[in-house]
Amino acid sequence: MQTPVFAAICASILGLAAAPALADSGTEQPQAHNHAHGAAMTASPAPATPQGAVTLGDLTLRGAFSRATPPGAPVAGGFLTIDNAGAADRLVTARTDVAGRTEIHEMAMEGEVMRMRALPEGLPIPADGTVELKPGGYHLMFMELKQPLVEGETVDVTLTFEKAGEVSLPLAIGPRNAAAVMHEGGGHEGH
Ligand SMILES: [Cu+2]
């Protein structure tokens, strides 16, 4: 069974604390990082036109980000929120030049074990609904990374939806433990 090993890699890359045996990167603070961009979160609980948002038909894609990777890291996660103001749709594929291939994954805790799997049918986007791709849940999985992802830069990702079609959008690359990344003008968190 290769899946548990890969799941552990995935969990590590996504910065989750579910695999205590992983002494690798940035796990000195296993609890969630909630300190970043608090002002922005409290200021706009339901932003109508958030910064960095991309619209595609009835879909609004916002908050797209990824995380910096150490040299040689094989995979990275991509995250965004999809608002759908219309009929049900489906995210069927994703691709980016920085990865050999990109999959759409889901991840969930089963007891104390982190499980993840590809969604070969894609990710359903319910009518008049919102789907979040976020650490610990649905995510884009960039595999066979061709280069490290560097904090402060962006990577372009192309998403294809069953009905809405195709759109390209930039993912802001945050720190390795980023829970979210503000786009330009959004007060990038500073340490
Ligand atoms: Cu994954």
Image (cartoon, rainbow, N blue to C red):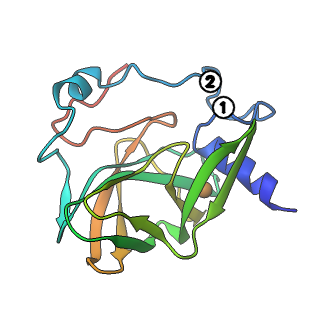
Which amino acid type corresponds to the residue marked 2 in the rendered image? Pro
Left or right side of 128 for 110: right
Name the amino acid type tagged 1.
Answer: Ala
Question: Position of 27 compared to 156: left or right?
Answer: right
What is the number of the mark on residue 17?
Answer: 1
Q: Which residue is mark 2?
A: 30
Image marks 2 and 1: residues in contact by CB distance under 8 Å = yes
Is 5 left, or right, of 131 in this rendering?
A: right
- Vertical side of 168 occupied by 53: above or below: above
Q: Position of residue 14 (x, y in %)?
A: 57, 44
Along the line of sight, which residue is nearer the eye, 12 or 125?
125
Across and down, in percent, residue 162 comes to: 36, 80
Disc 1 secondary structure class: loop
Q: Position of residue 65 (x, y in %)?
A: 37, 48
**Which residue is at the front of the view, 6 or 130?**
130
Q: Residue at x 37, y 19 (%)?
A: 191
